[in-house]
Amino acid sequence: MKLKKMNLSKNEKYLLVLLGVVVVFWIFNRFIFTSQRNNLQSFKDKKIEYEEKAVENSGILAREKGINEDFISLNREKDTLLLEYFPKLDQSQIIFLLNEILDDSNLEISNLNFSEPQIEEIRGIPINTMDISIPYKGKYGDLLKLMNKIEKSPRKLLITNLIIDQDEENLIGELRLKAYSSETIFEKDEDFVAIDTVLNTEKENPFKPFVEYEEVKDEDIVDMNEEKGSSEFESSGSFLPSGESQEKLNKTLVESFDEGKIYFVPSHLNTKGNVYRSRKAKEGKYSLRFEYNILAVEEENRAYLDFREKNINFKYPPDTIGFWMYSYGYSPATLGIRFEGQMGEKIDVEVLKGINWIGWRYIKAKLPEDLNIYPLKLDKMYLELVNGREDFGVILLDGMECVYPQVEEDSAYKGSYTFYIVKEGDTIESISMKYYGRTSKKKLIMNANDLSGNKDLRPGRILVIPK
């Protein structure tokens, strides 16, 4: 069958061409132009969003100085709160504080009763609390004095209940207190309980274990029964290398490595390692065993020991910082210490390049001398390899300390100091209770600040407090 050809007129051909153009345009508009318009609108929206963020960031940068001041102020407020509350509810530490308060009291205290720690919600914040019951017998005036001392305690204790009864010439009853902990609010090292204790007390610590007692809680302690290593640098029972006189140096122990948390942190995935406590110690019960395995394939190739939870701070530069280090063999690694400034800036101090001895050696390093960057916080220690090298091994660390110059002609107080800003209502007695737990130490504060009495105190004055 033969198909007939359709003859189109000239106008019909024009219309078909026009129809084709319209179809093509519709396809472009539907699948290409519309998508591009949506993308363009999306880019415009993002541009506006980024411009708003840029304006916001410019405002933040303009307020940088104020933010820095607020940051320092908030840190000070945090430190003040940590000083006023118990870092964790530990019975022995609470007893130690109460013992200082009750020691000057004429009341007869038969015993102290503690409840189990409980969670109390205050303004939506869960707070750890512990109830304390104190049965007493004595005079009314002595009871008032005791309550006044509790109110001025360096750690806040809330009097929740007071029972008073008469027994012939004396009062008998029960005083109930509540202790609060800051551990649910601020992160704190589990092994650290800060408590303000009395300096130079003649009383023996009732919680000190007897000589033969030894308790090991850490499962990661390495049993090192071999004989302690020796080298020409070893000095029995001393942190000082040979040739330096103890009388000319004022030493401050920074880290004993006997307790607390220190973590291993790699700079990248090709760095492995771990940390343990070891009984092979130069000073104290334990040293820190630092195992490392570094494959140097990145720009930074470091095995870190993280000290941040230790909260070790340096208010001003010492002459040197030193520690004992035990080496089992040669290593090309560089040993260094990283510090952190108040604004989070990192400062690396190179201690030594290469390890080329076996046994114990005392290592010393100089801290930055620029006073403008202090106070500094000990952030990390590290072993570092240059790119293209590989090394693994073990070192032991012990007895980290700072050495300060001793001023021989100064026969005054040789301890350390802190500062206190006087607040409205403060007295020399209340400040003495805050820092020493008793008012009898007020002369230390008066002598250090040339005070003749409470009339010399005014809000805003900065006092020097001997520790």
Image (cartoon, rainbow, N blue to C red):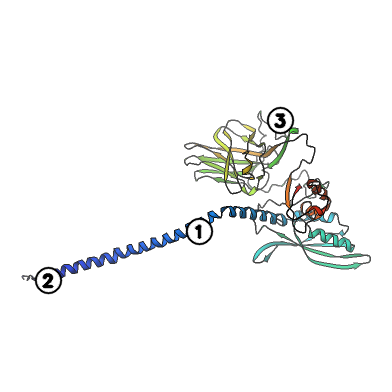
Q: Which residue is mark 1?
A: 56
Asked if residue 283 lies left or right of residue 53, the reply is right
Asked if residue 286 lies left or right of residue 247, the reply is left
Front one among 382 and 349: 349
Q: Earlier in the sequence, mark 1 or mark 2?
A: 2
Q: How many marks?
A: 3
Vertical comparison of 443 with 116: above or below: above
| Residues at circles 1 and 2 in contact by the CB criterion of under 8 Å | no
Q: Which residue is mark 2?
A: 11
Q: Position of residue 321 (x, y in %)?
A: 65, 38
Nearer mark to the viewer, of 3 and 1: 1
The amino acid type of the residue labelled 1 equals Glu
Helix, strand or loop at label 3? It is loop
Cα–Cα gap, marks 1 and 2: 64 Å
Helix, strand or loop at label 2? It is helix
Front one among 459 and 257: 459
The residue located at (19%, 67%) in the rendering is 20
Vertical comparison of 141 with 340: above or below: below
Does residue 10 appear anywhere in the picture?
Answer: yes
Cα–Cα gap, marks 3 and 1: 58 Å
The residue located at (53%, 43%) in the rendering is 272
The amino acid type of the residue labelled 3 equals Glu
Residue 373, located in which quarter of the rendered image? top right
Q: Which residue is mark 3?
A: 244
Q: Position of residue 366 (x, y in %)?
A: 63, 36
Mark 2 surroundings: few (<14), some (14-19) or many (≥20) residues within 10 A? few
